[in-house]
């Protein structure tokens, strides 16, 4: 039995899902295949993703393929209540609502696991982690899983290295049609959107500090520059830092950037990136936001200890008045600002990410018996299929290699 905030929002949610479907031609192509094939007949999917209109389309595609789907959110603030209501009205078992407590969040995850899923989809690996710790009996049922985000893949690779991973998982995040588009263009745009919706500030001329220059950081830094901001990148990886420099960004230590930044955004996948020593050097009025998966990137306990008072100025904006008199503004409780204060990635970019999930699920079902409990890459043929379908949907045609060119690229006999 689903549990959502308000079932009466279903009509509004249905319209949002219809709009998303118009932006997701690749996934709709997959849906047409699955309606005929029914590759997931008699299978149960346990899913913990951000409950947005784009996720709803993925769920509809899996259902069209014959799957029984149980869905929870993967973040206490990211659920779109109207979408959850609409999916519930369609017969999907949904356990999600916006602004959950930690206890409610894990209750929802456990409701999904009560369905004894055969396949898990995660964004952050919380569902998989529960199975491996508190619900180990479910390991007899699960045949495989899939992971959507960088943070989750980091956790899974650590588990696999320590031989703690007990079933095969596909790293959907790591394939080019996901991370080169979803992470760069999706996170870049939606993070700017979340900051603007929460604050309505002018970005032009602001000193923006981007913490992390992975795919998400690259996208965010470029989007911020496009809005007229003066962007500084802070990194710990020398190659990423060098690339940020060559891309034209200022690069410095975070302790130095703390003195000059107007806006700080973490996109690292690590914990305690912004902490006490940085808060103490920030100027009055600095804004703090996070677009990494978990709310641990900004060390909020340090902020609480430094503050003499705290209040909510407006939705998703908390004002901390420090003992030195400076005010710092934390957005969305340090959680994903692009999903808490805005609507997350555009559906058109999630089209590729979720097409990867849908196609990898079929591949997993067909091949899992030969898999070990390891982290698997998305097959290249799936990635290329998605790219070709996306190009076709955009009306773009590309060239093909001639036989002569193919031979040249695969032989060693021709030289200068």
Image (cartoon, grey):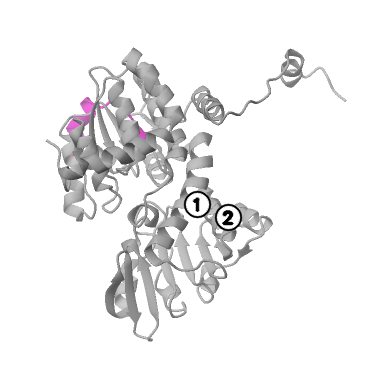
Who's the residue at 35% across and 62% down the image? 334
**Would you name the residue on which mark 2 appears?**
222
Place of residue 102 in the rendered image (x, y in percent of width and height, measured from the top left):
20, 54
Direction from residue 304 to residue 344 in the image, left or right: right
- Which residue is farthest right? 416
Q: Residues within 10 Å of mark 2 (few under 14, many from 20)?
A: many
**Would you name the residue on which mark 1 appears?**
188
The reply to whether residue 163 is in sight is no
Who's the residue at 41% across and 34% down the image? 22
Sequence-wise, the earlier of marks 2 and 1 is 1
- State which quadrant residue 278 falls in: bottom left
Q: Secondary structure at mark 1?
A: helix
What is the span of residues highlighted in magenta in the rendered image? 135-147
- Proximity of marks 2 and 1: CB atoms separated by less than 8 Å: yes
- Which residue is farthest bottom? 324
Direction from residue 25 to residue 227 in the image, left or right: right
- Circle on res. 272: none
Place of residue 141 in the rendered image (x, y in percent of width and height, measured from the top left):
22, 25
Who's the residue at 42% across and 75% down the image? 279
């Amino acid at each position: 039995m689903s549990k959502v905030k308000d079932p009466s929002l279903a009509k509004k949610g249905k319209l949002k899902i219809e709009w998303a479907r118009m932006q997701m031609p690749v996934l709709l192509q997959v849906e047409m295949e699955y309606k005929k094939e029914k590759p997931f007949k008699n299978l149960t999917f346990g899913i913990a993703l951000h409950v947005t209109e784009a996720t709803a389309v993925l769920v509809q595609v899996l259902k069209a393929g014959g799957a029984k789907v149980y869905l929870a959110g993967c973040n206490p603030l990211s659920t779109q209540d109207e979408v959850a209501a609409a999916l519930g009205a369609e017969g999907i078992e949904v356990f999600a609502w916006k602004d959950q407590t930690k206890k409610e969040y894990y209750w929802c995850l456990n409701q999904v696991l009560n369905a004894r899923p055969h396949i898990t989809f995660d964004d952050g690996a919380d569902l998989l982690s529960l199975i491996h710790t508190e619900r180990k009996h479910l390991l007899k049922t699960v045949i495989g899983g899939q992971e959507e985000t960088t943070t989750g893949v980091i956790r899974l690779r650590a588990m696999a290295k320590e031989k703690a991973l007990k079933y095969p998982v596909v790293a959907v995040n790591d394939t080019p049609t996901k991370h080169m588009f979803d992470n760069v263009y999706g996170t870049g745009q939606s993070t700017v959107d979340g900051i603007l919706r929460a604050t309505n500030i002018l970005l032009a001329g602001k000193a923006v500090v981007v913490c992390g220059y992975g795919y998400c950081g690259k996208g965010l830094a470029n989007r911020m520059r496009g809005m007229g901001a003066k962007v500084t990148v802070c990194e710990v990886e020398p190659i990423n830092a060098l690339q940020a420099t060559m891309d034209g960004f200022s690069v410095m230590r975070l302790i130095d950037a703390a003195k000059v930044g107007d806006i700080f955004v973490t996109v690292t996948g690590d914990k305690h990136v912004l902490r006490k020593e940085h808060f103490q050097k920030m100027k009055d009025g600095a804004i703090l936001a996070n677009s990494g998966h978990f709310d641990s990137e900004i060390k909020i306990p340090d902020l609480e200890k430094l503050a003499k008072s705290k209040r909510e100025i407006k939705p998703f904006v908390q004002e901390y008045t420090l003992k030195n008199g400076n005010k710092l503004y934390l957005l969305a409780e340090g959680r994903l600002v692009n999903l808490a204060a805005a609507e997350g990635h555009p559906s058109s970019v999630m089209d590729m990410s979720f097409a990867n999930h849908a196609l990898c699920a079929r591949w997993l079902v067909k091949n899992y018996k030969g898999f070990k409990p390891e982290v698997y890459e998305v097959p290249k043929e799936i990635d290329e299929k998605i790219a070709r379908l996306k190009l076709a949907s955009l009306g773009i045609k590309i060239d093909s290699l001639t036989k002569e060119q193919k031979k040249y690229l695969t032989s060693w006999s021709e030289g200068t």
